[in-house]
Image: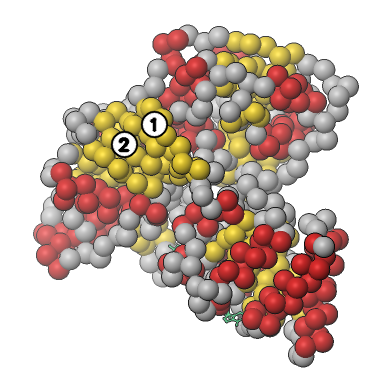
Amino acid sequence: MSYKDVWVLSEQEDGKIKLVSYELLTRGRFLADKRNVKLVAIILGKSIDKEGLQELIYRGANKVIVIEDTSLEYFLPEPYANTVASLIQKYNPEIIIASATTTGRTVMPAVAIKCITGLTADCTDLDIEEETGNLIQTRPAIGGNILATIMTPKYRPQMATVRPHSNKPLVPDNSRTGDIIYEKVDKSILKSRIKKLDFKINQEEDANIQDADVVISGGKGLKKEENFQMIRNIAALLDGAVGASREAVDLKWATYPHQVGLSGKTVSPKFYMAVGISGSVQHLAGIKTAENIVAINSDPEAQIFQVADYGIVADLFEVLPVLTKKLEALKQ
Amino acid sequence: MKIIVPIKQVPETSNVSMDPETGTMIRDGVESIINPLDLYAIEEAVNLKEEHGGEILVISMGPAKAEMAIREAISMGCDDGILLSNKEFAGSDTLATSYALSQAIKKFNPYDLIICGERATDGDTGQVGPGIAAWLDIPFTTYVSNIKEVNENSMIVQRMVETGYEILEIETPCLLTVIKEINYPRLPSMRGKLLAKKKEIKTWGPDDIGAKKDYLGLEGSPTRVVKISKPKVSRGGEILMPKNESELDKAVDGLIEYLQKKEII
Ligand SMILES: Cc1cc2nc3c(=O)[nH]c(=O)nc-3n(C[C@H](O)[C@H](O)[C@H](O)COP(=O)(O)OP(=O)(O)OC[C@H]3O[C@@H](n4cnc5c(N)ncnc54)[C@H](O)[C@@H]3O)c2cc1C
Ligand SMILES: Nc1ncnc2c1ncn2[C@@H]1O[C@H](COP(=O)(O)O)[C@@H](O)[C@H]1O
């Protein structure tokens, strides 16, 4: 059988294309250009915003395959996995990548089993081996202690999830053209044994650390619950989200959705600031792909400084008030 | 309720050291533990058993010493354990691992629930849970932070996603992967430890689970690790040590300039 083209699995919410999907197109475009093939975006939903579909083309796709059905309105593992698997079996793409979001990391493992092929989770880098067309997949493992390079030499398609925010969307180019195709799949595969009864938006808006461009995190060095408010203030000044070390979460200064690290969330913001965090291996595992890291810690030996691009060795209770004041002044 | 909990034994990575030459982990003297994120799966199973009655089977695929992990799970309140251990299983990636585990789980049909950890701290993929569900063709969901209700043929669970929590009704039998928020794992009890010590743990190979050999181990694994390297530890950033107030002020100015240069403000 011959396998061709690079696919990206796009995501939508309430019919609007999510930003991560545009980021993913950048990766896909790079791979498709290297392979000299088409880049196809797949999108599942109920009634998807037409402008958003067009924007998938403007931002890199040569073709968009849309599957609309009421059962696909929002993510449910079974109808999503079955639909993606059936499209793969129909068109035989050579590569299919998805964002390593809660959706991507749930649907792709099931798709990989249905297609009996390999899947590499949470890649930070993707490239093509020119002679073979093998996808070179790089990902951190063992709590960020190593980088593993993984290939899927004998199986197709090659599948990977890619860390959100590990690259930028392409600037939309309105001169780009491509087809938007509406496909139907057999009703029988859209059945779901799961129903969504409700959705509770996280009341703490600043908890969405995975999607944020700026994450300000606090650790045990803040000493008391009240002091954690200083972290929230700075995050608010920078329009960022609030992160926390496990110690801070265990002490109930912040709730679990804020926890960064091995047993919390992996973040890759443009800017990560760690305040009063020692930088344990487990914490570092969650921030290694952050673009810029700043640390404030009174201990010059603190491990966090090893990964910092800019660090201040000082008492956080002296630094934060000054920083807050200066940021406030800039805002005015 | 009949609950099955797949657990993995992993190296204790909190103070792992790396060979700077080869970029591989120095495994000598590294202790093996239950994947810390599987403790939440075990705890949740034990909670459900305490509330609804039933039995819990733990199952692990790994080397002979993974038996220790199974015993530890039993000491926390699980009833029985199976170890899948055989050279044919060695080198399995998530496809082959989830295949082998699903084959073993089929032997325990009918069951009500399978609970997995969110991910293993060594491979860190989170793919084995959904993989098992796909092989078994049972409904599944991930990132479960609360089991709200257990009914005759379904359960109601809460799932954490980027922007909040979904409330889902899922038909049983099903598979859930759970996150840390769901509970506080207990420590083994004295009685549990005694029971665990005496328990006979069966070891199964490919024939015991009726597995196709070409779906197992290295041969059955589509993915290949072709290189291991060490991420650069030090970013070689600028680290300032202000000695007085004016130096501190300068350091903060430097931070603000940095933010401006990187277009964050
Ligand atoms: C299996 C496992 C999983 C784990 N998962 C995670 C995880 O997901 N996330 C996570 O974060 N941790 C995790 N941990 C815990 C981790 O090992 C550390 O215990 C934790 O990260 C430490 O948090 P901390 O840096 O806030 O506290 P500490 O290590 O106590 O560090 C506090 C820091 O604050 C500094 N400080 C104190 N006072 C001041 C001051 N006045 N001004 C400036 N600095 C000051 C100190 O110098 C110190 O460096 C995990 C551990 C295990 C075993
Ligand atoms: N070898 C194994 N034996 C038993 N269970 C496993 C094994 N590997 C993974 N699991 C289960 O699958 C979950 C996710 O693991 P992983 O996909 O490797 O990150 C773990 O938390 C375990 O519940």
Q: Amino acid at mark 1?
A: Leu
Distance from disc 2 to disc 1, alpha carbons, whole Å, reads 9 Å
Looking at the image, which residue sits at the far bottom?
A: B244
| Quadrant of res A68 | top right
Does residue A134 appear to the left or right of B53 in the view shown?
right
Labels 2 and 1 positioned on one and the same chain: no
| Along the viewing direction, whichever of A322 and A94 lies nearer the viewer | A322
The answer as to whether callout 2 falls within 8 Å of ligand 2 is no
Tag on residue B156?
Answer: 2
Marks 2/1 in contact by CB < 8 Å: the verdict is yes
* Chain to which mark 1 belongs: A
Tag on residue A249?
Answer: none
Q: How many marks?
A: 2
Does residue A228 appear to the left or right of A35 in the view shown?
left
Q: Disc 2 on helix, strand or loop? A: strand
| Residue A304 spot, x, y in % from top left | 63, 71
Q: Circle 1 sits on which residue?
A: A197
**Residue A101 in sight:** yes
